[in-house]
């Protein structure tokens, strides 16, 4: 079986590794850029994604690169605690949750693909279109430097080419631009004093303005930094712009301009404006997704990751869901009686679940606790239980884990996607 993957992001690279582990080794990844570089900032890998990468043999490297998240805490814009829950092994999972730099994770996946599938990554070559209806469907790839076209053949074509997927656009030509919800995000990293226990992911604010932070290094791990830790942060604010503007990993903003939006957000345990203004670089992009579609698969072509289900960065699910897509697709291709059956099973398993997550994220997912607290107590509270009951808080957290497929009992007891 010959598989061609469009896109060498986290989803595409994870797909190549999953296919290799399942015994499918005739794999090619076509990537439009001429060089893969460790772009972006931090992401969280939830236990269901860590399980899949661990079963692909990357557990030790993840432990080396990432920080195991101990807990997730929600606060209002005054720094008052709304809800805290343990994460990873502390929450009963058999696998940890990691905070990790997106670019470092991508480079780990790239290096592992090059080791296990030498020569499979072709840079400077984007997939423009495919005709998947006949066996050995044709794929048109274009060289970035001179525009030369080449016609390739593959038994399966996987569109892992992101939110602006060319292959998705070929099947949904009237879809248009991604859907913007009016929020602008600024993401960066900064070296700051450790906060709380040094491994906590925090979210503070509400549906109008929010700050997220989690450490990308352990306290004491960088002797030359005098005890500081590298923290990834996301500053988020509703804006009055006429449109979302550019949606990429390269648009920058002035940290001091953004920090002014958060004047007064100085908590006893974290100085938010100081964190933002300490960033060496701040990347700006709008919070966008796309409406879920009824179908990913057309003949021998299917979609994966952000090309299939771009979602708001809420609940730490974007990259994690792409990794699970990859493992599910590889398992079905290796075990089903035919390619059409495999792609049908893959879509049948993954499309409903990711649609539910996408729509839940539009309703703020587990972050609803912050908005509810804001609506009921906009000036703060003496104790959260004066505003929300323990049962309500627990219910919101549990519902999201169930819908996203990472409730501890579901994940721990689920059969492995490894192919014997």
Image (cartoon, rainbow, N blue to C red):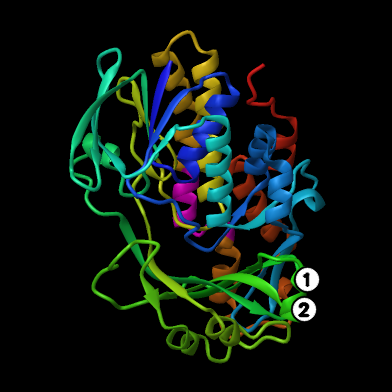
As drawn, the label of residue 384 is: none
Picture disc at residue 227 = 2
List x then y, in percent, for residue 128. 23, 37
Instruction: Please report the residue visible at 40 percent of the width from the left and 62 percent of the height from the top.
Output: 249
Quadrant of residue 181 within the rendered picture = bottom left
Secondary element type, mark 1: loop
Give how far across and how far down residue 340 sits, in percent: 39, 15
Residue 123: quadrant of the picture: top left
Q: CA distance from mark 2 to mark 1?
A: 6 Å
Identity of the residue drawn at 76% across and 81% down: 226
- Magenta stretch encompasses residue 253: no
The quadrant of the image that shows the N terminus is top left
> Compared to 277, does 121 lie above or below?
above
Q: Is residue 356 above or below residue 64?
A: above
Residue 195, can we see it? Answer: no
* Residue named by callout 1: 219
Q: Is residue 362 magenta?
A: yes
Q: Given contact means CB atoms under 8 Å apart, are the residues at marks 2 and 1 in contact?
A: yes
Range of the magenta residues?
A: 356-366
Predominant secondary structure, magenta span? helix
Tell me what residue is drawn at x 37 percent, y 46 percent: 162
- Residue 1 showing in the rendered view: yes
Quick check: 379 left or right of 295?
Answer: right
């Amino acid at each position: 079986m010959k598989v061609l993957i469009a896109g060498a992001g986290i989803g595409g690279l994870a797909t190549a590794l999953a296919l290799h582990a399942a015994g499918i080794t005739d794999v090619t990844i076509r990537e439009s850029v001429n060089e893969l570089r460790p772009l972006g900032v931090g992401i969280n890998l939830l236990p269901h994604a860590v399980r899949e990468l661990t079963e692909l043999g990357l557990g030790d490297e993840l432990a080396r690169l990432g920080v195991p998240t101990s807990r997730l805490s929600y606060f209002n814009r005054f720094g008052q605690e709304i809800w805290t829950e343990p994460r990873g092994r502390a929450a009963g999972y058999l696998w940890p949750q990691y905070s990790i730099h997106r670019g470092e994770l991508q480079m780990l996946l790239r290096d592992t693909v090059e080791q296990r599938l030498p020569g499979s990554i072709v840079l400077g070559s984007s997939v423009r279109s495919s005709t998947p209806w006949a066996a050995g469907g044709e794929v048109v790839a274009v060289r970035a430097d001179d525009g030369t076209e080449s016609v390739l053949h593959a038994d399966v074509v996987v569109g892992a080419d992101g939110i602006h997927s060319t292959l998705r656009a070929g099947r949904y030509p009237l879809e248009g631009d991604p859907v913007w919800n009016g929020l602008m995000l600024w993401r960066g990293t900064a070296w700051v004093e450790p906060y709380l226990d040094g491994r906590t992911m925090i979210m503070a604010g509400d549906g109008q303005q929010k700050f997220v932070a989690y450490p990308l290094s352990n306290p004491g791990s960088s002797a030359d930094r005098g005890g500081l830790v590298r923290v990834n942060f996301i500053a988020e604010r509703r804006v009055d712009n006429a449109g979302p503007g550019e949606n990429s990993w390269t648009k920058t903003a002035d940290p001091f301009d953004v920090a002014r939006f958060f004047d007064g957000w100085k908590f006893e345990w974290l100085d938010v404006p100081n964190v933002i203004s300490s960033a060496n670089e701040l990347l700006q992009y709008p919070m966008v997704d796309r409406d879920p579609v009824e179908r990913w698969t057309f003949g021998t072509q299917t979609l994966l990751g952000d090309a299939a289900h771009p979602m708001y960065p809420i609940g730490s699910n974007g990259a994690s869901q792409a990794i699970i897509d990859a493992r599910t697709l590889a398992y079905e291709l290796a075990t089903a009686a035919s390619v059409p059956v495999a792609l049908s099973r893959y879509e049948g398993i993954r499309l409903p679940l990711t649609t539910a997550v996408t729509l839940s994220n539009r309703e703020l997912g587990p972050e609803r606790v912050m908005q509810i607290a804001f609506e009921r107590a906009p000036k703060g509270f003496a104790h959260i239980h004066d505003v929300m009951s323990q049962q309500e808080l627990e219910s919101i957290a549990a519902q999201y884990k169930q819908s996203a497929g990472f409730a501890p009992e579901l994940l721990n007891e689920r059969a492995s996607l490894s192919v014997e």
